[in-house]
């Protein structure tokens, strides 16, 4: 299949018509040692880099062949350095280099292979209790305070909150656990996620599903229109619960004690369609009142604080939102790393997806972006979409103008 050519009327189409290729991609290496100079690469054998809202820690890899710089190649790139990938001069991903492999052979010549993870990996690698971070003993803290406390002594310099609830919640740390596991335990009952912005800012909050669509990806056979290499729509609603029955511990063995209003139906199109044809996928969620003072019990207590008196329905909504991610998954592959407006494709954005053969023409949420390059294929971007209103409960699907700006970590 031939590569779709963007219309010349679009900024991307105008750029391609003028230059004959996609905007350049560059890799900037910022050394951890201030005595070393930054270096920038613009020619690659291959690379892959992922940015996801669902997965906190993303991985990247680069391969450079026959660099022309003199001297030791290890002086150019070292483990611990920061890798910044730019598309058309705009940052699309930032990571921490974990490994550097330098080799020479008769077939490939000199090759530098670089791999690493996004900066949130520091939360994965560090323990909550260490030589500079003291334990937190069940304190009542704001989300701001928890995030700021956990990113201390890491190389994450900025964070921002997005659609987070106000108030203070219980939080505790314990020796041996990672900072990331402590953060995710704290965020889970609050219906929040943690991921990284392209510039290395830690984001804590809910997906921005109320944002305006930044463009349209189309694969229309009848009108012979397409601006993507390939598209797949995967419908899989049969295993998604269409009836959630949250019950208190002790109710699970006595059906007559469960009041009808405790039952919650899944309103998503796929599960509700199956329910209408008497295809039942009921799920029972057992809820208990926390009775301990350990960190996990404190998180459960936070769930009661967020849910108020209707904690059973809150648990049901969380289960529904998580399951509905798989109701329909759309995978789009495009040439280059840009939309029609010449903006880099990044996660936590919305696009219209028009794929008539799969019955799709709606705004969808872009939760994962994968960038890749190879000598044979050039720049490619893989986009993973889900329907609005999934992933976490209580996510806003209408515009939320009050989005917090990034804040510097205070020590």
Image (spheres, rainbow, N blue to C red):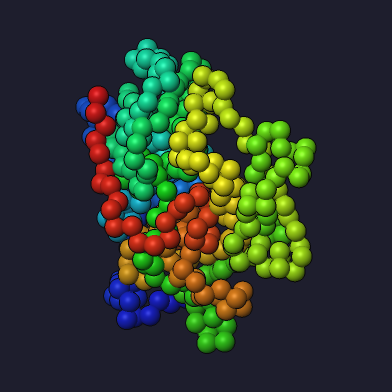
* Residue at 71% from the left image edge and 64% from the top image edge: 275
Residue 117: x %, y % from top left: 44, 38
Q: Quadrant of the C terminus?
A: top left
Residue drawn at point x = 42 percent, y = 43 percent: 195
**Residue at the outermost top position:** 131
Q: Is residue 391 visible?
A: yes
Q: Examine the rendered structure and indicate whether residue 297 appears above or below residue 261.
A: above
Residue 205 position within the rendered picture, expressed as x and y whole percent measured from the top left: 40, 44
Q: Residue at x 35, y 47 (%)?
A: 162
Identify which residue, 366 or 69, lies in the foreground.
366
Compared with residue 27, is residue 297 higher up or lower down, i.e. above or below?
above
In the rendered view, tell whether residue 233 sits above or below residue 249.
below
Q: Residue at x 56, y 73 (%)?
A: 360
- Which corner quadrant of the image does residue 75 belong to? top left
* Near-viewer residue (284 or 2): 284
Residue 122 visible, this angle: no
> What count of labels does the image hold?
0
Q: Quadrant of the N terminus?
A: bottom right
Q: Left of 158 or right of it: where is 80?
A: right
Residue 230 quadrant: bottom right
User: Farthest residue toward the bottom?
Assistant: 223
The one nearer the camera, 176 or 311, is 311
The x, y position of residue 202, in whole percent, is 36, 40
Say left or right for 4 vs 22: right
Name which quarter of the figure residue 284 lies in.
top right
Give residue 54's position: percent from left, percent from top.
50, 47
């Amino acid at each position: 299949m031939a590569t779709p050519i963007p219309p010349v009327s679009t900024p991307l189409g105008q750029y391609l018509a003028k230059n004959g290729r996609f905007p350049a991609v560059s890799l900037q290496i910022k050394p951890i040692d201030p005595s070393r100079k930054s270096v920038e690469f613009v020619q690659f054998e291959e690379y892959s880099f992922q940015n996801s809202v669902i997965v906190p820690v993303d991985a990247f890899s680069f391969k450079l062949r026959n660099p022309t710089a003199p001297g030791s190649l290890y002086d150019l790139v070292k483990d611990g350095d920061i890798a910044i990938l730019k598309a058309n001069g705009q940052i699309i991903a930032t990571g921490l280099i974990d490994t550097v492999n330098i080799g020479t052979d008769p077939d490939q010549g000199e090759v530098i292979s670089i791999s690493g993870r996004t900066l949130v990996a520091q939360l994965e690698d560090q323990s909550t209790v260490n030589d500079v971070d003291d334990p937190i003993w069940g304190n009542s803290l704001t989300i701001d305070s928890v995030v700021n406390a956990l990113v201390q002594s890491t190389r994450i310099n900025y964070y921002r909150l997005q659609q987070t609830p106000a108030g203070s919640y219980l939080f505790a740390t314990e020796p041996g656990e990672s900072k990331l596991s402590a953060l995710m335990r704290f965020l889970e009952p609050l219906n929040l996620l943690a991921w990284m912005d392209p510039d290395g800012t830690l984001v804590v909050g809910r997906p921005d599903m109320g944002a305006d669509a930044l463009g349209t990806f189309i694969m229309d056979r009848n009108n012979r229109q397409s601006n993507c290499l390939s598209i797949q729509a995967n419908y899989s609603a049969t295993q998604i619960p269409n009836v959630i029955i949250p019950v208190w511990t002790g109710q699970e063995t006595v059906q007559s004690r469960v009041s009808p209003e405790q039952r919650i139906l899944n309103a998503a199109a796929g599960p509700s369609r199956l329910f209408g044809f008497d295809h039942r996928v009921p799920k029972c969620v057992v809820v208990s009142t926390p009775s301990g003072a350990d960190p996990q019990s404190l998180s459960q207590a936070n769930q009661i604080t967020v849910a108020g008196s209707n904690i059973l329905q809150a648990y049901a909504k969380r289960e529904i939102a998580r399951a509905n991610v798989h109701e329909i998954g759309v995978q789009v592959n495009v040439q280059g790393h840009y939309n029609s407006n010449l903006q880099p494709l990044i996660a936590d954005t919305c696009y219209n997806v028009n794929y008539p053969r799969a019955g799709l023409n709606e705004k969808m949420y872009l939760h994962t972006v994968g960038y890749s390059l190879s000598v044979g294929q050039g720049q490619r971007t893989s986009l993973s979409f889900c329907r609005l209103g999934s992933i976490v409960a209580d996510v806003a699907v209408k515009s939320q103008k009050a989005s917090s700006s990034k804040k510097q970590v205070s020590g």
